[in-house]
Image (cartoon, rainbow, N blue to C red):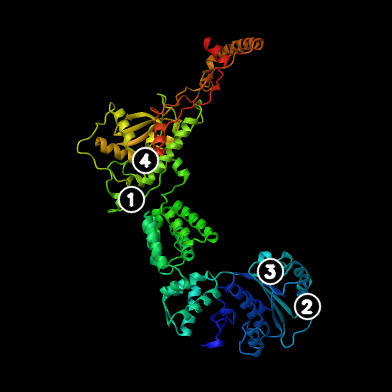
Amino acid sequence: MTTGAHYTVLARRFRPQAFDDVVGQEHVARALTNAIKAGRVAHAYMFTGARGVGKTSTARILAKALNCPNAKDGVPCNQCEICDGISAGNDVDVLEIDGASNRGIDDIRSLRANVGVRSMRTQYKVYIIDEVHMLTKEAFNALLKTLEEPPPNVKFVFCTTEPNKVPDTILSRCQRFDFSSINDISIADRLREIATIEGFEVSEDALELVARRARGSMRDSQSLFDQLLAFSDGTVSAEDVHRMLGTAGDERLVNLFDAIVEHRPGEVLAQLDASFATGVQPGELMDQAIGYVRDLMVTVSGGDAVSLCSVATRHRETLMKQATRLSMHSVMAAFQILSDGKNQMFRSTFARTVLEMAMVQVSLLENLSAISDLLSGRLPVLPEVATGHPEATNVSTSPAAALPAAEKKNADTLKIAEAKRVLAAPTTEIHADEDASESHKEMPDGAAVVAEAPASPESASVELPPVAAAPEIELTQENCPALFMKLLSALGLTISAGLRQASGLKLGSENRLEILLDSSSEFARKALDQADNRARIEAEILRLTGRTVCIALRLTAPKKSVTASSAGATVSPSLSKSVTESNAGHAAKSNQRNQRAEASPPPAAPLRNLMGEVDPASDMFVREVMEAFGATVVRITNAPAVQVATSECDNADAAE
């Protein structure tokens, strides 16, 4: 090991010297090796990729493979004078140019003047230009002709981290190789080899932490590992890595998010305070929290083969439990909150306060669901409250009272939205079409029946409430109205909103109980047709009556009758002659009415309020809105009155 003033860092001492030593870039090494073997080496190459992935090292290896006198099948010997000079960067025929400091047109002119000079002792003169995207537009234009038709003994290798800034005229004249980021496993394996050579004992957790911290860069991992070896006394553990980086350990992160998932902001603040006391930096902890939320998203999405970026792999099962309790929508919302907090840290001197506010805000997130799910009547399946939890005390045995607070809040929001829709909807006439859905086929008595859906696994898994010793109500047709009112008061708000659209219950044969629902109530039909909602209704009926029933929907025809056009379609052919004569008479009378209408203009239509007046004391929807928001009635404003013109022709036909 080199010590003192002549110490060479690990990134330079363990630099790759052959194509096989370049970790994670096997596709580039194979292409270049085969090109050298077949004598198909291009005159210009473009190496692109993130920092520290081996672009310049590969360029040097390519120069050695082309000029080494002892090279065999594209593999340099790394023992001759030419190989040593190229590895040290002082060979006269291999010129490494920094594109950031030699970016002007004068520098490119000097390069063009020297291109024609033959190499002194090697077969090829190789120009390696690092950060080539830093060249000016004029410099690129001056390089074009030389790059397109260079002397036969000249090769160009351009290295850049931002290929989008290189003109297309340059890119089209080069063979481009994209260097990929190096995976964590390969980085950890390489660091393990270095630790063995250096004589240090490093734990696997420490190697995994350093590999994750490098984020795909081999040079970054070696620089960080060099600092870690200097920090330790011969043995390196994961705690040493956290102390040096100012990050929190895996167990502390898991405990912090346990408190967040269980909605305990006080414990969240206590965990943060304990972390800061041990030297954890707020910015680093924010980065770890964002990575942890990303891991929650990966686990809940089923990405078992995707590696974690915040904690060790052994915590994957814990992450799955936490992500399941939060739900995907809450995880997405948490990521947005933490990302906004990270942006605020750059503009604020109160980094700790920003982190605490963001963490507490995440811990107060309710279980979120997609708006489309709520509108369709599908409520999320929320986790049950653990036994012994403070929220588990004083819980009513009623199914409505046993609903979690988040589900009640979601149902309140759904009910308010439905109330607004009902109040704002104008009166429309619904006609029965012949092309109606098969589920709305008319019955002789004017009703439409929906076929009963098969029982789903969700309904089978619903836990039935305890049946009372003495039924509260006997299940008969006479008691159906009373049973209907009890269901409205006992079930959740989503089911109650659907039941309020129904006209009642009807007891059928073989324990079949039908809900009479207008076929135009699309929202109520979707809500009540859900398997879990039907199971809850059946469970509540079992508790009230002591009988097991099967719930089905009977869709009744719309309140208004069918139009004359659809009814006229069924007229028998024998009456066609009389119908024709009747139509002719109607046509003559219609012409007379039109002439009278032209002589005198029709009177103005009366004003009507289509929505009617709202009475807060009796309107159920308005009362629910007032209770949900804690509102009081200030004043009542009537809806705008509109003119509803009654057809004179229709009135005349009705009189005749």
For the residue pair 427 and 617, the one nearer the viewer reads as 617
- Cα separation between marks 2 and 3: 19 Å
- Cα separation between marks 4 and 1: 18 Å
Nearer mark to the viewer, of 4 and 1? 1
Residue pictured at 42% horizontal, 24% vertical: 446
Residue 248, can we see it?
yes
In the rendered view, does 652 fall on the left or right side of 123? left
What amino acid is found at the position of numbered circle 3 in the picture? His
For the residue pair 240 and 494, the one nearer the viewer reads as 240
Pointers 4 and 3 in contact (C-beta within 8 Å): no
Q: Quadrant of residue 495?
A: top left
SS at badge 4: helix
For the residue pair 295 and 420, the one nearer the viewer reads as 420
What amino acid is found at the position of numbered circle 4 in the picture? Asn
Label whose residue precedes the other's in the sequence (2 or 3)? 2
In the rendered view, does 177 fall on the left or right side of 181? right
Q: Quadrant of residue 556?
A: top left
Nearer mark to the viewer, of 4 and 2? 2
Label whose residue precedes the other's in the sequence (3 or 1)? 3
- Cα separation between marks 2 and 1: 75 Å
Return the x and y of residue 97 as percentages of the image width and height. 69, 77
Residue under circle 2?
Answer: 110
Q: Which mark is residue 533?
A: 4
What amino acid is found at the position of numbered circle 1 in the picture? Glu
Label whose residue precedes the other's in the sequence (4 or 3)? 3
Pointers 2 and 3 in contact (C-beta within 8 Å): no
Residue under circle 3?
Answer: 133
Nearer mark to the viewer, of 2 and 1? 2
- Disc 2 crowd rating (10 Å Cα; few below 14, some 14-19, many 20+) is few
- Cα separation between marks 3 and 1: 57 Å
- Vertical comparison of 509 with 19: above or below: above
- Vertical comparison of 382 with 303: above or below: above
